[in-house]
Amino acid sequence: GENVEQHPSTLSVQEGDSAVIKCTYSDSASNYFPWYKQELGKRPQLIIDIRSNVGEKKDQRIAVTLNKTAKHFSLHITETQPEDSAVYFCAARGGNTPLVFGKGTRLSVIA
Amino acid sequence: GAVVSQHPSRVICKSGTSVKIECRSLDFQATTMFWYRQFPKQSLMLMATSNEGSKATYEQGVEKDKFLINHASLTLSTLTVTSAHPEDSSFYICSAYGGGGGGGYTFGSGTRLTVV
């Protein structure tokens, strides 16, 4: 089955700097790669996603890149703000199979 | 957008009792429901997958007799934690597949179970 690795596990950045979180996946059949932001005790919130037919997608300060050949995808947050502090999860799946999550990255944005 | 209602949001129960968690898709038909468990400061771990009208498929290491899943209709799935123990204390969250957004996945709001 699918296996998703996520790095780093923790990340601290100064407000205004960029943050990058990287994930790799194992199943070449996976075709959907979402990123979630989760605040303590709440459900994961989808912040951006990308499908396997696209290499990059951007939504304001957030962008995701996908390298199908290398089987890795990354989340980029620019101009970070304190409210970006949360745990971020990447995930991967193919078809209607379950989402397989990475272990998460705890992002701290220091004002 | 697609909405999944999960109840209860928090529950405290005594060891040995059973707890039922419900997830309802309010505006779409959930052909598949995924149940996850999340321990503090850890990721979401898939427990089981259920399709409407079929027996659930459990992940390795998850006891099917302890975590009973029922998906009797396209809008309702339940997870019952039977004979709960303190080590079952966790955040349980469902994800329904079949709605429009987020690749077809919609998460419930989660249930914080504490077994005392």
Image (cartoon, rainbow, N blue to C red):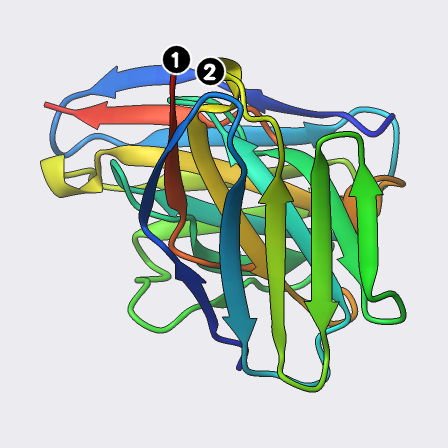
Chain letter for the residue marked with disc 1 in the picture: A
Residue placed most toward the observer, A64 or A30: A64
Quadrant in the rendering for residue B60: bottom left
Quick one: label 2, few (<14), some, or many (20+) residues within 10 Å?
some
Q: Quick one: SS at disc 2? A: helix
Instruction: Name the spot of residue A85 as percent of width and height, x first.
Output: 44, 24
Q: Same subunit under labels 2 and 1?
A: yes
Mark 2, mark 1: which one is toward the viewer? Answer: 1
Q: Is residue A30 visible?
A: yes
Name the residue that disc number 2 marks.
A82
Of marks 2 and 1, which one's residue comes earlier in the chain? 2
B64 vs B56, left or right, is left
**Badge 1: residue crowd in 10 Å (few <14, some 14–19, many ≥20):** few
Q: Is residue A44 left or right of residue A13?
A: right
Identify which residue is drawn at 52% across, 49% down. A20
Please identify the quadrant where the N terminus of chain B is shown.
top right
* Amino acid of disc 1: Ala
Q: Nearer the viewer, residue A97 or B70?
A: A97
Q: Chain of mark 2?
A: A
Identify the disc placed on residue B24.
none
Disc 1 marks which residue? A111
**In percent of the image, x 22 and y 34: which residue is there?**
B89
Q: Residues at badges 2 and 1 in contact (C-beta under 8 Å)?
A: yes
Q: Position of residue B18 (x, y in %)?
A: 29, 32
Image height of B17 relative to A90, above or below: above
SS for callout 1: loop
Residue A70 screen position, x and y as percent: 63, 84
